[in-house]
């Protein structure tokens, strides 16, 4: 829809703040190499596919009934996974799950944001934070980052003190920059947020498993308003499953249950997620491969003369281009789809299989006119 053609829904009596907006979404183009949405390039291995089929078959026998409304078995397995991989004991009552971490974040804003309230994020960051804020009627405040994309701690503290937001988003590793946030930064912002309001601090760790650093999850201990949000979309190679989860104080889990739709997590979703969780070690093996491919992309892009932001995620931000969108289009003409997140001068590429990454690097060489 072009900027000056009114969309058909603009003529409807929709909420004023939605008028003139377009729906979120990266282009889904049919090109040979798609490295634009931070998906895991590895399909689930056959034994996991078979186990999913078994568990879904079992669930199908009772589909006449509503699913476990509180997803207790799934939350218990997620708690075990977090305890094992994040170096901190987490109980079932501290975990909540929903249809993708986007829904987890939406439920948090439904419970802690809403009309007359505000949320802050440090941009550039995951654009859905602002969009979910808008969808829930929560005001949005854009907080600062340094030029190298690290969170500007002093600026962030000042913005929190000034605006007294109800929800603070910290994305680590950050999307689209790949930047990890230090534990000290989270602690400083948590302290500022408690002094200002107190307010909920949400650490979005969608890419946590890909980081060089340990998870920030142990910080929830003794901090009743700190939430860690996670997803099975990336590390578990299950973006199509739609399963996100959080870890926080049980009171936060209780608050989220006030706004969740009853039976929001289908029996099929719960069965599929449980089957995947039985094979965590296999799936984390792919994460290791992707981490080393990510590091290779950083090294090779730098060798080609690109500027590259240090990455702790399964993607890499590279630039700087006078006209990033022109470079995006030139790469597309070479059959490689990357992401233009609108950060001036920069593009983002997701780490794919070694062959996909080679194709991407060849395309960059061709576009920059560098010898192979
Ligand atoms: N947080 C961040 C930082 C993300 O990049 C994404 C996905 N792009 C999500 C949350 C949402 O992921 P999902 O809903 O698939 O769990």
Image: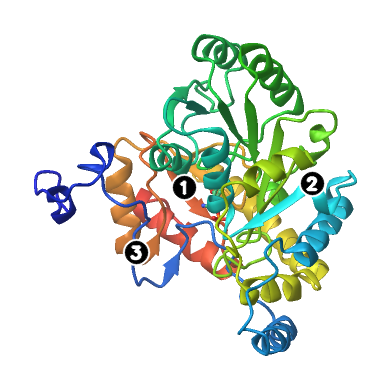
User: Residue at (81%, 50%) from the top-left corner?
Assistant: 93
Compare residues 2 and 129 and report the one nearer the observer.
129
Answer with left or right where residue 217 lies relative to residue 36.
right
Q: Residue at x 57, y 18 (%)?
A: 152
SS under mark 3: loop
Q: Which residue is mark 3?
A: 334
Neighbour tally class for label 1: few under 14, some 14-19, many 20 plus, Cα within 10 Å: many
Residue 335 pos. (x, y %): 36, 67
Can you see residue 213?
no
List the residue tagged with mark 1.
348
Q: Which is more toward the observer, 5 or 352?
A: 5
Between tags 3 and 1, which lies in front? 1
> Disc 2 to disc 1, how far (Cα)?
34 Å
Measure how far apart labels 3 and 1 are at the Cα level: 16 Å
Q: Measured along the vertical axis of the image, is residue 33 above or below residue 158?
A: below
Quote the CA–CA distance across marks 2 and 3: 47 Å
Asked if labels 1 and 2 touch by Cβ distance under 8 angstroms, the answer is: no
Q: Position of residue 47 (x, y in %)?
A: 75, 85
- At label 3, counting other C-alpha atoms closer than 10 Å, the crowd grade (few under 14, some 14-19, many 20 or more) is some
Is residue 359 rendered to the left or right of residue 184? left
Please tell me which of labels 2 and 3 falls first in the chain. Answer: 2
Q: Work out whether residue 128 can be spotted.
A: yes
356, above or below 370, in the image: below
Tell me the quadrant of the picture where the N terminus can be found. Answer: bottom left
296 or 64: nearer the viewer? 64
* Label 3 within 8 A of ligand 1 by Cβ: no
Image: 122 above or below 362: above
Residue that numbered label 2 is attached to:
94
Q: Is residue 294 left or right of residue 320?
A: right
């Amino acid at each position: 829809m072009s900027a000056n053609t009114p969309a058909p829904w603009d003529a409807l009596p929709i909420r004023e703040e939605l008028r003139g907006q377009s729906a979120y979404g990266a282009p889904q183009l049919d090109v040979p190499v798609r490295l634009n949405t931070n998906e895991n390039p590895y399909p689930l291995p056959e034994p996991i596919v078979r186990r999913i089929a078994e568990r879904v078959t079992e669930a199908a026998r009772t589909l006449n009934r509503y699913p476990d409304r509180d997803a207790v078995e799934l939350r218990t397995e997620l708690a075990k996974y977090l305890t094992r991989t994040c170096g901190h004991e987490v109980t079932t009552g501290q975990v909540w799950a929903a249809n993708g971490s986007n829904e987890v974040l939406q439920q948090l804003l439904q419970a802690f944001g809403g009309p007359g309230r505000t949320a802050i994020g440090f941009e550039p960051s995951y654009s859905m934070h602002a969009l979910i804020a808008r969808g829930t009627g929560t005001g949005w405040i854009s907080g600062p980052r340094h030029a190298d994309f690290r969170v500007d701690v002093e600026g962030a503290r000042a913005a929190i003190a000034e605006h007294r937001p109800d929800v603070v988003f910290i994305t680590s590793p950050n999307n689209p920059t790949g930047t990890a946030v230090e534990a000290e930064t989270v602690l400083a912002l948590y302290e500022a947020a408690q002094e200002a309001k107190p307010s909920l601090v949400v650490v979005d760790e969608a890419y946590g498993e890909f980081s060089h650093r340990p998870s920030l999850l142990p910080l929830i201990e003794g901090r009743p308003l700190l939430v860690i949000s996670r997803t099975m979309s990336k590390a578990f190679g299950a973006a199509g499953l739609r399963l996100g989860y959080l870890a926080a104080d049980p009171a936060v889990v209780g608050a989220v249950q006030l706004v969740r739709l009853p039976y929001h997590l289908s029996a099929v979703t719960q069965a599929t997620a449980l089957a995947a969780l039985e094979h965590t070690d296999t799936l984390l093996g792919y994460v290791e491969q992707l981490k080393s491919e990510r590091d290779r992309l950083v090294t090779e892009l730098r060798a080609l003369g690109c500027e590259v932001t240090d990455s702790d995620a399964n993607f890499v931000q590279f630039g700087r281009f006078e006209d990033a969108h022109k470079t995006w289009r030139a790469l597309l003409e070479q059959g490689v789809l990357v992401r233009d997140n609108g950060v001036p001068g920069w593009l983002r590429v997701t780490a794919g299989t070694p062959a996909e990454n080679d194709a991407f690097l060849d395309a960059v060489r061709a576009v920059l006119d560098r010898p192979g």
